[in-house]
DNA sequence: AACGTACACTTAT
DNA sequence: ATAAGTGTACGTT
């Protein structure tokens, strides 16, 4: 297996990605970085010119644990839409808290669109920065308008 | 192995 | 405003 690493700018951040062919192992938002090759659809997506990332998937979706089920549910949320932690929890027969946990530990944000999961009364959280969540949702709402 | 604590929540007092 | 329920992870014993 050949692990490839690249980065792509998004606002003030660099989106760093580690991937191999079709499988993404890690996505991080860092303040530093250097533009380099990333999966094509990721670049288009971050540029607001694609609504669905099709050419890669996340390794976390394939696992066989409680989080993976949650992640798969999160992936069903369409572009430009948001659902609450509670709604995801209900579909997975668990509690909202657990969904929050799963989101916080999401190894591949964007690929797994955890920014579309919000709290029942407000935006909810996002790491490393809530600004990123806002920017992503803002971008999606513009395309969707 | 057990225990405590910390959460990207929600609902009911 | 505060508390209780919730499941997982992670640190400390």
Image: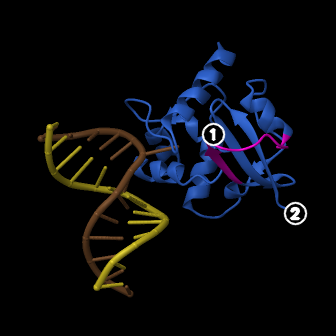
Chain colours: A blue, B brown, C yellow
Q: Nearer the viewer, residue A60 or C6?
A: A60
Q: Position of residue A62 (x, y in %)?
A: 71, 59
Extreme residue in the top direction: A145
Query: Residue at left 43%, top 36%?
Result: A124
Give me the C-alpha separation between circle 1 and circle 2: 25 Å
Identify the residue at horizontal 58%, vertical 22% (top origin): A138
Give the quarter of the figure containing the C terminus of chain A: top right
Image quarter of residue A43: top right
Q: Is residue A33 magenta?
A: yes
- What residue did someone put label 2 on? A2
* Percent x, y of residue A46: 72, 31
Q: Dot 1 falls on which chain?
A: A
Quarter of the image for residue A23 reads: bottom right
Q: Tell me if mark 2 has few (under 14), some (14-19) or many (20+) residues whose alpha carbon lies within 10 angstroms of its own.
A: few
Q: Residue at x 84, y 52 (%)?
A: A22
Q: Nearer the viewer, residue A78 or A12?
A: A12
Nearest the eye: A98 or A133: A133
- Give the percent coordinates (x, y) of residue A68: 61, 56
Q: Earlier in the sequence, mark 1 or mark 2?
A: 2
Give the answer, above or below, for where A95 lies relative to A50. Answer: below
Q: Which mark is residue A113?
A: 1
Mark 1 vs mark 2, foreground winner is 2
Disc 1 element: loop
Position of A52 relative to C9 (above/below): above
Helix, strand or loop status at disc 2: loop
Magenta stretch secondary structure, dominant: loop
- Corner quadrant of residue C2: top left
Give the magenta-colored segment's residue range: A26-39
Label 1 and label 2 in one chain: yes
Please tell me whether residue A54 belongs to the stretch shown in magenta: no
A11 left or right, relative to A96: right
């Amino acid at each position: 297996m050949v692990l490839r690493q690249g980065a792509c700018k998004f606002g003030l951040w660099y989106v760093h990605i580690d991937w191999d062919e079709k499988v993404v192992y890690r996505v991080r938002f860092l303040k530093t970085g250097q533009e380099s090759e990333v999966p094509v659809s990721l670049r288009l997506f971050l540029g607001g010119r694609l609504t669905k990332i099709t050419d890669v998937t996340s390794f976390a979706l394939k696992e066989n644990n409680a989080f993976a089920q949650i992640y798969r549910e999160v992936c069903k949320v369409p572009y430009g839409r948001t659902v609450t932690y509670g709604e995801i929890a209900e579909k997975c027969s668990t509690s909202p808290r657990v969904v929050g946990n799963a989101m916080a530990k999401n190894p591949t944000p964007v690929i797994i669109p955890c920014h579309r999961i919000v709290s029942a009364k407000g935006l909810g959280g996002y790491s490393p920065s809530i600004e990123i969540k806002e920017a992503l949702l803002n971008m999606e709402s513009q395309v969707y308008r």
